């Protein structure tokens, strides 16, 4: 089968943000080419002899992704990627910042990324595993979450998702009501419910994400009565604001800073007095902007957690 191969010529500093934002437009997986030397952590994970580190590291990188010719409009995809590059350019070096395409053939590239998605510990009590992998609990009290993200964002491996899972692991109480805005694969709602929440209301603007979240709820044996799933934009949709409900103990939003800022202005009625508002998806260069939005809307900052260049706010 033939595929269209899109290639972004960029800078290594932009790869993480590009990866995150390509997920947002439905790109299932990416392939990265760079000349960066392996870290000591990477070397410890490998079971082969390590070749000498490349001497010609020029900080350039190529990000490749693939789409079926009859299921995409190449010109539209290129325009989307160019928009993403312009946004990323505000925060870090993007190098050449060009997009090109070619044709290639690979029988099963769409599933190749699954080779690299292995079980991992996302929080002290929470282990994430793909549905196709076997896993034996290390500790009796471990909470095991099975995920098949499909084409929805959220395997749990990204720093922003880990920060949210760790916050839920720390703050969730038995019977809590949780509102998950931008639910993606449903992983945060599932983590909340498996950690003792009584009900989760999950919302996403992507209809596919809502479908995938429902499938993952079923895989994790979450009773239908314990969650509600809605498709739409909470900021602009009055009907959805009603469906989202009020008096939630915890609201979690793992999106992007540019969405979190306006969301923070309308989210208060959905949170009970003293409830927690957990937000991530925030690159560190946007931290001050989100901090200001929280303060301007009457939130008290309980804690700010960091992981690499990403941050997570816990506020009430």
Image (tube, rainbow, N blue to C red):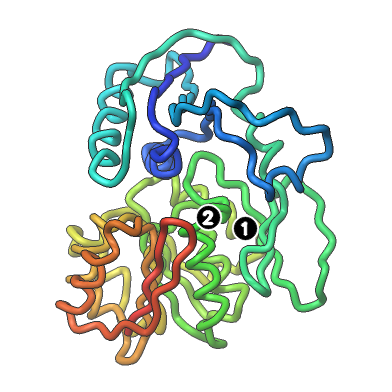
Identify the mark at residue 218; answer none if there is no mark: 1
Which residue is located at x 60 percent, y 69 percent? 223
Within the image, what quadrant is residue 10 found in?
A: top left
Question: Which quarter of the rendering shows the N terminus?
Answer: top right
Q: Where is residue 299 in the image (x, y as percent from the top left)?
A: 25, 82
Q: Where is residue 206 in the image (x, y as percent from the top left)?
A: 36, 46
Which residue is located at x 38 percent, y 57 percent? 281
Within the image, what quadrant is residue 2 found in?
A: top right
Q: What element carries label 2?
A: helix
Q: What element carries label 1?
A: helix
Q: In this view, does 108 lie to the left or right of 96?
A: right
Which residue is located at x 47 percent, y 47 percent? 153
| Label 2–label 1 contact, CB within 8 A | yes
In this view, the residue in front, 307 or 118, is: 307
Q: Is there any visible trace of residue 147 in the rendered image?
A: yes
Q: Where is residue 228 in the image (x, y as percent from the top left)?
A: 44, 66
In this view, the residue in front, 36 or 226, is: 36
Q: Is there any visible trace of residue 251 in the rendered image?
A: no
Q: In this view, does 36 lie to the left or right of 93?
A: right
Query: Up-down: is 236 above or below 31?
Result: below
Q: Position of residue 29 (x, y in %)?
A: 53, 34
Query: Up-down: is 47 above or below 161?
Result: above
C-alpha span from label 2 to label 1? 6 Å
Which residue is located at x 39 percent, y 32 percent? 11
Question: Which quarter of the rendering shows the C terminus?
Answer: bottom left
Residue marked by disc 2? 214
In this view, the residue in front, 222 or 204, is: 204
Residue sticking out furthest to the left: 296
Q: Is residue 197 left or right of residue 311?
A: right
């Amino acid at each position: 089968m033939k595929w269209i191969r899109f290639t972004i010529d960029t800078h290594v500093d932009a790869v993480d943000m590009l990866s995150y934002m390509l997920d947002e437009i439905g790109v299932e997986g990416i392939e990265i080419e760079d000349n960066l030397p392996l870290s000591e952590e990477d070397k410890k994970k490998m079971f082969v002899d390590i070749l000498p580190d490349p001497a010609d590291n020029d900080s350039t990188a190529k990000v490749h992704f693939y789409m079926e010719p009859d299921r995409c409009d190449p010109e539209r995809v290129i325009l989307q990627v160019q928009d993403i590059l312009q946004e990323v350019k505000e925060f870090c070096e993007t190098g050449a910042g060009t997009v090109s395409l070619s044709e290639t053939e690979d029988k099963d590239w769409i599933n190749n990324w699954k080779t690299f998605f292995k079980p991992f510990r996302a929080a002290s009590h929470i282990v994430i595993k793909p549905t196709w992998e076997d896993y034996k609990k290390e500790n009796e009290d471990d909470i095991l979450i099975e995920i098949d993200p499909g084409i929805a964002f959220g395997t749990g491996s990204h720093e922003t998702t880990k920060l949210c899972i760790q916050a839920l692991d720390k703050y969730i109480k038995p019977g809590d009501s949780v509102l998950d805005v931008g639910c993606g694969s449903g992983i945060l709602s599932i983590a909340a419910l498996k950690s003792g929440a009584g009900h989760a209301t999950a919302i996403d603007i992507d209809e596919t994400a809502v479908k995938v979240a429902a499938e993952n709820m079923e895989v994790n044996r979450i009773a239908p009565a314990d969650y509600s799933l809605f498709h739409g934009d909470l900021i602009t949709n009055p009907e959805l604001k009603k469906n989202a409900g009020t008096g939630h103990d915890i609201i979690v939003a793992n999106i992007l800073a540019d969405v979190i800022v306006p969301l923070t202005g309308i989210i208060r009625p959905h949170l009970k007095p003293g409830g927690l508002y957990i937000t991530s998806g925030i690159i560190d260069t946007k931290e001050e902007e989100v901090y200001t939005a929280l303060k301007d809307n009457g939130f008290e900052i309980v804690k700010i957690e960091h992981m690499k260049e990403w941050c997570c706010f816990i506020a009430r």
